[in-house]
Image: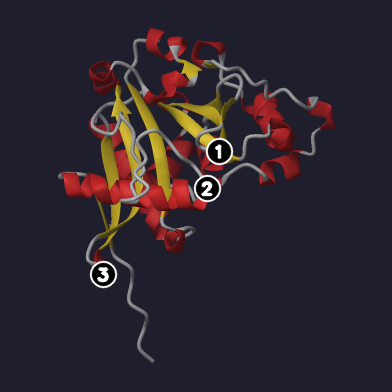
Amino acid sequence: MTAAPQQAFSVRLARTQDDVLAAQRLRYEVFVRELGGDGALVDHKAGLERDRFDPYFDHLLVTDVARGDVVVGVYRLLRDDQAREAGQFYSEDEYDLTPLRASGRRLLELGRSCLHPEYRGGPAMFHLWQGLADYVLAHKIEILFGVASFHGTDPQALAQPLSLLHHRHLAPPELRVRARNFQSMDLIPENQLDRRAAMLEVPALIKAYLRLGGCVGEGAFVDHSFNTTDICLVMDTARMNARQKGLYVKGPEA
């Protein structure tokens, strides 16, 4: 019996406009077709999910070598120097980032992380995390942050997981960003939470960051245009212990 061929992936930053378009096509499939999102610059005719920040971000790509380097995973990365050029961080429309800006430390905003459905739960996610870890080391990043989403715009339907994040994973005061159109996440008293059931409702990507020692800002932001309820994740690399740093370099299973 012939063994099944091993999947081979490559990880790199987008180098050309065609690379960026490939990332935007994958984002359209996931965020628009699959999750029902929209936006002012979304091109439904061409099948591209894009916004005004794309020219300033670095786009991290995972490609399937066996399929002709087709893009199967993406991450958007915006350093603090790139944010100055853009005029702001993407998530500043949703969160007051004053505590992070005041820290004087090197910042990296993460966003638009997604994998093609056929590649979820497999090695492609490992390669995406490895590429991110390499990028963080190369640019001496100290704090990573970005919005992550729950599907849907009804906070009461998400009361269990939002309350769990508020009670158990709230960022320390010096890193505690706050939602602008503030939606409290303190919806259920801690002693009334079913913690196991609540954690099952937390999306895999958010759980991966929590395992790395990540924390969340105060309050959620309901994004009706993207059909999501967003939280802001913050991760201070100096607070990661040796085990967490090992997971980060190896890639937590999301």
In the image, taking residue 112 as reference, residue 86 lies left or right, namely left
Task: Report the amino acid beneath label 2.
Answer: Leu
Locate residue 112, reporting x and y percent: 40, 39
* Disc 3, SS: helix
Is 14 situated above or below 216? below
Identify the residue at horizontal 27%, vertical 51% (top origin): 22
From the image, state whether disc 3 or disc 1 is nearer to you.
1
Identify the residue at horizontal 26%, vertical 16% (top origin): 84
Residue 13 seen in the figure:
no
Q: Which mark is residue 227?
A: 1
Q: Which mark is residue 35?
A: 2
Tell me if label 2 and label 1 are in contact, CB under 8 Å. Answer: yes
* Disc 1, SS: loop
From the image, state whether disc 3 or disc 2 is nearer to you.
2
Task: Report the amino acid beneath label 3.
Answer: Ala
Q: Nearer the viewer, residue 9 or 15?
A: 15
- Name the quadrant containing residue 2: bottom left
In the image, taking residue 68 as reference, residue 1 lies left or right, namely right
Identify the residue at horizontal 35%, vertical 35% (top origin): 41
Q: Nearer the viewer, residue 177 or 133?
A: 177
